[in-house]
Amino acid sequence: MTTTLQTRRRRTPRLALAAAALALAVPLAGCATGATGATADAAPPAPPQHQQGGHSLTRDDVDTWLDGAVGSALQKTGIPGATVSVVADGKLLTARGYGMADTGTGDTPARPVDPDSTLFRVGSVSKVVSATAIMQLVEQGELDLDADVQQYLDFDLDTPKGAVTLRHLLTHTSGFEEVIAGLIGTPGSERTLREAVSDAPPEQVFTPGTTPAYSNYGATLAGYIAERVSGKPFDELLQKEVFEPAGMTSSSFAQPLPADLDARLAHGYPDDSKPAVETEVVNAAPAGAMSATATDMARFMLAHLGDLPDDQALLQPDTLAQMHSPALDADDLGTLAAGQRMDLAFFDDSTPGLAAFGHDGDTQVFHSAMRMFPEHDAGVFISMNGSGRSAMASLDLRTTVLQGFADRYLRDAPADAAADDESRGGAGTVDRDGPVAADLAGTYLSSRSPFSNPGALLALSGQTTVEPRSDGTIAVTPKPLGVTTGVYEKVDTDLWREVGGDALLATRADDGATVDAISWGASFTMLRAQPWQAASTVLPAVVLAVLVLLTSVVVWPATALAGVGRRRRDEVGQTVAAPRRRDRTLLLSRLGQASTLLALVGWAIVAVQAMSFAEVSAVTLRVLQALQLLGVVAIVPAALVAWRAVRDRRGWAVVTGRVLVVLSLLVLAGFAFGFRLIAPSVSF
C-alpha cells in the first residue's frame, strides 16, 4: 500500500505537466500559423460592392428599389419588420413599412408595420435629436460650447485629464471610459437623469479633445445639462422645443410612453422565430430613449436640411451649418484629423464626391440609421425591430439601404471601373511620407472600453490585428463594423482607404514612428495594445495557468488521503509537528488555488452578463474580488511549499509541479491586476 501511494504522488505531477504541455501546444500552433501568414500574404477579400448609379430619384423608382432591397430581405434575415422614409427636394418622397410590428406570437394580435403610425425605438439616433435641443440653448446664449461644463452641474465631475466642454461631449472626445452597467434595463429599472450621470460616473482616461471614444455617458451628461439649464424635465424639453415645432406628433423620449403612443410601438424581437422581449428602458435617455415613426423622422431630416417653413424651423441656418461641420481640428486631434471627424453630434459620413452626415442607433433588438446628403437635399431613414438570425443581419440591411441609396440616386454612373476606383483614391495616389504599413502592424484595443474597473476584462474580446502586406497595403482583422478582413491602401500622409471602398482609417504616432492610435468612423479609435493586453499573449498564458491549478486542485483529494494514511501511521509511532505545519501551508496554497479558479469562473459569467446588459450586483463583484485576492495571497504559501520541495529533494516531478503552481498563481495575479479585476471601483 505504501508503494502504491508513493507511485501516485510521483505520477500526478507528470500528468499535470502533460496536460500543461498540451494546453501550451494549441495556442503556440496558432501563433506559428499567424507568423507564417505575416510573411505570405493571404488572398485579399472581395472589395466592397457599389451599386450602379445614375437612377432618377422619383417615388416610383425608390419604392420599387426599397421593395426589393428591404421587403425581400426580411424573411431571409429573420428580421420581423422595418420602416423606411426618404426625403428629397424639401418634402417627404416616400415612406414604406415592411413586415410585422407584432408577429402575433405573444398575447397580442399580429400587426403589420405602418410607416405613419408604427413607432420604433431609434437607439442612438436619439443623440442628434437631443443635440438639436442643446444647440437651441446655445443659440439662446444659455449654454457655451467651449465652457467647462462643471458650471452647469449640481455635482462634482472628476476630470483629472482636463476640463470637459459641451463640444467634447457632442464629439465623443470628453475622455471618459465606457459605461456598461445600467445602460439598458427592463420596466421598473428606470432611473432619473441625474442618477444616471451622478451615480458612479466613469473615470476620465484620455485628455479631452484628443481621442475619439464613443460615449453614451457623455451624450447623457449633455442632456442633463440641457435639463438643468432649461428647468424642464428632458423629455418635456424635447417635446416642447423639438417635436411640437417640427410637427413630429408621434415621437417621444418618455419612458414609459404615453398610452396612445405605447399602443403603436413595435415590439422588439431577437428574430422572427422568437417571442418579443420586454420593452427596453434606456436609462441614458438623451443617448438612446427616443421612439418615433418613420414619417416623424422624415420631418426631422427636413428640419436639418433646412426645408421646414420658418415657423417650424428648429435652428438658424448658421447653427445648422455649425452642427453639420467637423467640430474639432488638428490642434486637438493631431493627425487623426486627417480622417473622418465628428460634427456636433452627427457623424460626418462623407465619401469622395458626396457630402453626408447622420447617425446610427442600436438597442438590443432595435436597429436604426439615418443619413442626409445636403448637396442633394435628400435623406433616408431606416429602422428595424429585430436583430435577425445572424450577427450581421441588421447591419448588412441598413448598409444596403444607406449605401445603395447614395450609389443608385446620388452618384453618376461611372464611365468605367477604373474611373470609379480613381474617384475613391485608388492605386497611384500613395503618399510616401508618414507611417508605412509596417508602422501600423500590431494588436489594437477599442478606446470605447472600461479601463479602471473589472469591465476592462472585456478588452480581450473585439481586438483588432493589423498586418502589413507585401504590396504596401495593410490587412485589418476584423475590419471596423465587420467580421471579415479589410485591406486598406495609403492615400495620404496619415490616411488609409479600404481598397475598392470608402471606409477610412487615420493614424497617429506620438513618438513620430510607430503608430499607436488609428481612428475610424469619426468617434472610434483603436489603441495599440501593450504585450500584456494582447489576447494572443494573455489567453494562452491564462489557459495554461488555469490547467495547472485545475490539475493541482483535482489531485487534492488523493493527496489528502495520502496525508490521512501518514497521520495514522504516525499515531502508531511518533507524531512530528513539522509535517503538520507543512500540511497547513500546503492547505493554504490549495485553498488559494481553488479560490482563484472560482473567481475566474465568476468573472467569465459576469463578462457574459455585462455584454448582454444584465445587472450584476456590487456585492457579487466584491465577493469575486475577495476570492481573487485570496489567490494572490496564496502565492506566499505556494512559494514556501515549492521551496521546501526543493530543499527536501522531493524529486524533479514534485518540484516542477509546485513551481508551476507558483508561476500560475503569479500569472493569474498579474492578469487580475492588469485587467482591473482587483480595483477600487467595481462600477462598469
Image (cartoon, rainbow, N blue to C red):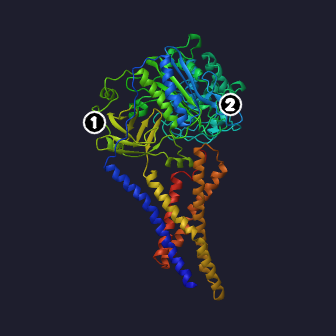
Residue 432: image tag: 1
- The residue under the point 38% across, 34% down is 335
Residue 231 visible somewhere in the drawing: no
Residue at left offset 72%, top offset 35%: 107
Looking at the figure, which quarter contains the N terminus? bottom right
Left or right: where 520 falls relative to 122: left
Instruction: Give whichever of 597, 16 is nearer the camera.
Output: 16
Quarter of image, res 601: bottom right
Q: Residue 680, position in %: x, y?
A: 59, 50
Q: Secondary structure at mark 2?
A: loop
In front: 679, or 70?
A: 70
Query: Does residue 164 sit above or below 377 in this rendering?
Result: below
Residue in view at x 64 percent, y 53 percent? 622
Q: Position of residue 677 (x, y in %)?
A: 56, 52
Local crowd at mark 2 within 10 Å, few (<14), some, or many (≥20)? some
In the image, what residue type sits under mark 2? Answer: Gln
Residue bearing the label numbered 2 = 255
Q: In the image, 280: left or right of 543? A: right
Where, by quadrant of the figure, is residue 124 drawn? Answer: top right
Q: Secondary structure at mark 1?
A: loop
How many marks overall?
2
Rendering coords of residue 25 (x, y %): 42, 62
Which class describes the residues within 10 Å of circle 1: few (<14), some (14-19), or many (20+)? few
Q: Amino acid at mark 1?
A: Arg
